[in-house]
Image: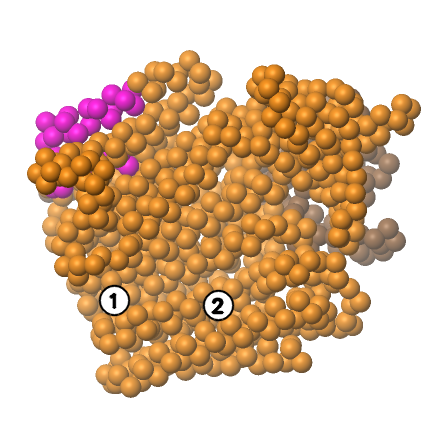
């Protein structure tokens, strides 16, 4: 009987430690996904790590190779958010295409640590003369990009 | 034509799998060896049918039969022949064929390897296999038919995803699937043991080698995936805790727990229920991964096309879990373990703790992977769980596992005295402390890595000590030279010493991961022609851009002259490829590997300055220490597995092996 109790205590300690690890890990690593409209509705600054997904607005991309400063605007058709990033635009990134950026939102500017590009066997950039419906389809696939990606 | 024949072949496969399942059950119920013989032949026919289906799809891919959707989606006129063939497993439907090929192959192998043996178990074993085959043929017949047509027939296909146009892509999915499917063998025998009520460790002993082999292929498949990610994706990393990666690592973690816990059952008759539960969960996780990544419930960089296939996998997974766990509960009265732990510190308790940690780790990865799904269901928010979560959870657990890897194999069974512990652990622990102290000044910013390195030294020291002690004893008693003694020692107990070599492989892998995650240097910079950048010990001089048109893409590359502390080490040419089929530019990173570190160069942008006409290149340069040791670890792991599963010449080797 005494042996039993020892095992129960040992098990509880192990489970407790594991639970502590998992909960502690979640607190720091959960990133919320938002759209430009949701973000602009929440004010000029939002605490915590965020992922913002939408379409890169045409004519908004400025890239300075010397300073590696990249700026662009992400839109969902209703609201537009200015994004800044340091580093070259990644593969698959371009105006009129979808992008998901991860970082922090403060003073009306989204400071992106990472720009995520989706490697998909199905991904094909829309033709220049894509119809509105096709663009809507593309946007839908972006919404599903909420999961992790790099 | 091909489409019609192909679809018919797959349908025939479904019918024959069902026939095989029914006839296997009947063979068991009525004790009819002739029916079992028919089941064996059915297994062979299934292999032939799957080969035929795969051959037909390859023929369609090679001949660019765009009337078949799979061909139209995964090849184009510009796709080279080699990649048309590997396109067989470039996307969902084809990869299911590959899976079915391995599954029918294992079915036939098991059926013929054990013909005439294990007469009570085999009918159920084969019934389980045929049921799994039937499921995969059903998937290929209905939701993911690789021969589905497309109308109107396009003039040209969309081409293989450019990232899959790579030689290593040839090996990663087949190897991974060999591992996934391989766990069907211990699972089928476990179920057979439950159904027939033969609850002895028989099933564990029969499937021992199969389990090791499945575990090995799963390990290798994951390592090859990391290799591919590192060498081809061009982001400088090899593991991102992406859902698809997690789906492949979860059965590996659970399988590792199973691999260790069965040894206690063999030796002490303990943990019977636990082992059955572990193999049921391992097998379920191989299915869960496919459900998770194919159903679209969670998105991932791998982002396979979504299809209704997820629902099929979920249903089959549910069936597997309900049936298996019901059987387990039904037999639970007869599954009482005999034997209890004699003392808190002994080999058994090391194995137990190893299992608790591994299962805990698997649970944490599982939770992190499905958390976005739970958050959306429960709170309606969209979240993602990033790599920091998985790292934070797995690093401390890995540290415990490393300690157990070093101490466990040395500690005595049943009861370990303090004196015994001191004798076996003193030297390895001393070395670990030395390594920790020596590395501390270098790794002050990253103490977790220093701890991991110290523990790795501990494991290596204990493995060397184990070989040394055994070899010295043989040297003394048999008068063999040391090298011969090591060889004969290993031969006499392959499983134990092979396992220790596998541990060394895992340690090298961990060293590579810890060093390259903790101590990498990274710089991104734009250079004009003639400008240079220094990263770590390397000096990179950008000399200019070049361009050329290749078979199905344009290539732009930067000529970068590299010197290492003044000594020239050669020219590197990071490139960007622009594929004509889809106008999708991707960068092709280049790297230079040494035992000490990897120099990894990515051309992220290339341009010409319009005013001066000089070339501009934006380079991302990474120096990642000890990466190569991950791949070397993979080779050592292979060596250890070969030693462990090499057939014994003496059939009486059982007793000795059980002593491992």
Write down the chain letter for disc 2.
Answer: B
Residue occupied by mark 1: B194
Give the letter of the brown chain: A
Q: Which chain is orange?
A: B
Q: Residues within 10 Å of mark 2 (few under 14, many from 20)?
A: many
Q: Tell me where residue B269 appears, x and y as whole percent.
A: 15, 54
Q: Is residue B253 left or right of residue B557?
A: left
Would you place residue A11 above or below residue B267 in this image?
above
Residue where numbered disc 2 is placed: B100
Residue positioned 26% across, 80% down in the render: B28
> Dividing the picture into quarters, in which one does residue B432 lie?
top left
Farthest right residue? B611
**Pointer 1 local density, CA inside 10 Å: few below 14, some 14–19, many at least 20:** many
Q: Of residues A52 and B488, which is closer to you in this image?
A: B488
Q: Nearer the viewer, residue B487 or A94?
A: B487
Q: Nearer the viewer, mark 2 or mark 1?
A: 2
In the rendered structure, are the residues bearing label 2 and label 1 in contact, judged by CB atoms less than 8 Å apart? no
Residue extending furthest toward the top: B441
**Residue B74 location, quadrant:** bottom right
The N terminus of chain B lies in quadrant:
bottom right
> Which span of residues is magenta-colored?
B404-433
Magenta span contains residue B344: no
Q: Is residue B423 magenta?
A: yes
Q: Earlier in the sequence, mark 2 or mark 1?
A: 2
């Amino acid at each position: 009987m005494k042996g039993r109790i020892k095992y129960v205590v040992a098990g509880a300690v192990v489970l407790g430690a594991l639970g502590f690890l998992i909960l502690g890990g979640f607190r720091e690593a959960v990133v919320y996904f938002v759209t430009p409209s949701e973000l602009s509705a929440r004010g000029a600054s939002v605490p915590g790590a965020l992922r913002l997904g939408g379409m890169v607005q045409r004519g908004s991309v400025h890239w300075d190779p010397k300073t590696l400063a990249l700026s662009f605007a992400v839109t969902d058709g209703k609201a537009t958010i200015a994004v800044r990033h340091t580093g070259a635009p990644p593969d698959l990134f371009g105006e009129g295409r979808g992008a998901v950026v991860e970082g922090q939102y403060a003073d009306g500017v989204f400071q992106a640590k990472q720009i995520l590009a989706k490697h998909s066997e199905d991904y094909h950039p829309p033709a220049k003369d894509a119809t509105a419906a096709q663009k809507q389809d593309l946007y839908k696939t972006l919404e599903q990009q909420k999961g992790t990606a790099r | 034509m091909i489409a019609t024949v192909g679809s018919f072949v797959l349908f025939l496969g479904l019918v024959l799998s069902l026939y095989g399942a029914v006839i296997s059950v009947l063979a068991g119920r009525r004790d009819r060896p002739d029916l079992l013989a028919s089941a064996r032949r059915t297994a062979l026919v299934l292999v032939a049918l799957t080969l035929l289906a795969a051959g037909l799809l390859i023929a369609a891919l090679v001949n660019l039969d765009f009337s078949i959707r799979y061909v139209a989606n995964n090849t184009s006129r510009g796709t080279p022949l080699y990649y048309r063939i590997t396109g067989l497993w470039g996307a969902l439907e084809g990869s299911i064929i590959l899976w079915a090929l391995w599954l029918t192959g294992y079915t036939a192998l098991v059926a013929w390897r054990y013909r005439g043996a294990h007469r009570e178990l085999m009918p159920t074993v084969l019934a389980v296999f045929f049921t799994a085959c039937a499921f995969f043929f059903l998937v290929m017949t209905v939701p993911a038919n690789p021969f589905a047509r497309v109308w109107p027939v396009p003039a040209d296909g969309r081409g293989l995803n450019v990232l899959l146009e790579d030689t290593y892509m040839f090996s990663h999915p087949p190897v991974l699937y060999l591992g996934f499917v391989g766990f069907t063998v211990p699972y089928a025998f476990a179920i057979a043991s439950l159904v027939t009520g033969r609850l002895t460790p028989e099933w564990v002993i029969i499937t021992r080698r199969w389990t090791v082999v499945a575990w090995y292929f799963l390990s290798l498949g994951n390592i090859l995936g990391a290799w591919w990610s590192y060498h081809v994706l061009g982001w400088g990393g090899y593991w991102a805790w992406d859902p698809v990666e997690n789906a492949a690592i979860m059965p590996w973690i659970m399988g590792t727990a199973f691999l260790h816990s069965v040894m206690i059952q063999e030796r002490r008759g303990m943990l019977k229920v636990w082992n059955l539960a572990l193999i049921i969960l391992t097998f379920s996780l191989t299915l869960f991964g496919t459900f998770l990544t194919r159903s679209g419930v969670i998105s991932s960089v791998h982002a396979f096309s979504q299809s209704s296939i997820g629902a099929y996998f979920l249903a089959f997974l549910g069936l597997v879990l309900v049936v298996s766990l019901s059987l387990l509960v039904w037999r639970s009265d007869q599954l009482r373990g005999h034997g209890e732990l004699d003392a808190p510190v002994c080999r058994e308790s090391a194995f137990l703790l190893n299992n608790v940690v591994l299962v805990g780790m698997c649970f944490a990865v599982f939770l992190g992977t499905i958390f976005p799904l739970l958050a959306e269901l429960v709170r309606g928010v969209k979240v993602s769980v990033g790599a920091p979560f998985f790292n934070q959870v797995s690093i401390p657990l890995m540290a415990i596992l490393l300690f157990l890897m070093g101490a466990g194999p040395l500690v005595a069974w049943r009861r370990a005295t303090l004196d015994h512990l001191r004798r076996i652990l003193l030297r390895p622990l001393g070395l670990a402390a030395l390594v920790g102290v020596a590395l501390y000044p270098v790794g002050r910013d990253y103490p977790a890595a220093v701890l991991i390195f110290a523990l790795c030294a501990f494991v290596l020291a204990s493995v060397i000590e184990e070989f040394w002690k055994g070899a010295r004893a043989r040297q003394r008693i048999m008068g063999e030279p040391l090298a011969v003694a090591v060889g004969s020692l290993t031969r006499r107990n392959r499983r134990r010493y092979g396992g220790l070599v596998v541990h060394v492989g895992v340690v090298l892998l961990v060293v590579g991961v810890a060093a390259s995650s903790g101590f990498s240097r990274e710089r991104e910079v734009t250079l004009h022609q003639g400008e240079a950048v220094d990263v770590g010990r390397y000096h990179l001089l950008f000399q200019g851009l070049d361009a050329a048109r290749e078979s199905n893409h344009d290539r732009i590359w930067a000529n970068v002259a590299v010197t290492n502390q003044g000594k020239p080490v050669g020219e590197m040419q990071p490139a960007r490829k622009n594929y004509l089929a889809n106008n999708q530019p991707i960068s092709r990173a280049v790297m230079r590997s040494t035992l000490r570190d990897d120099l990894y160069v990515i051309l992220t942008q290339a341009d010409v300055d319009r005013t001066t006409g000089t070339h501009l290149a934006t380079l991302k340069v990474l120096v990642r220490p000890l990466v190569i040791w991950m791949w070397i670890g993979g080779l050592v792991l292979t060596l250890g597995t070969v030693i462990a599963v090499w057939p014994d010449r003496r059939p009486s080797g059982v007793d000795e092996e059980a002593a491992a």
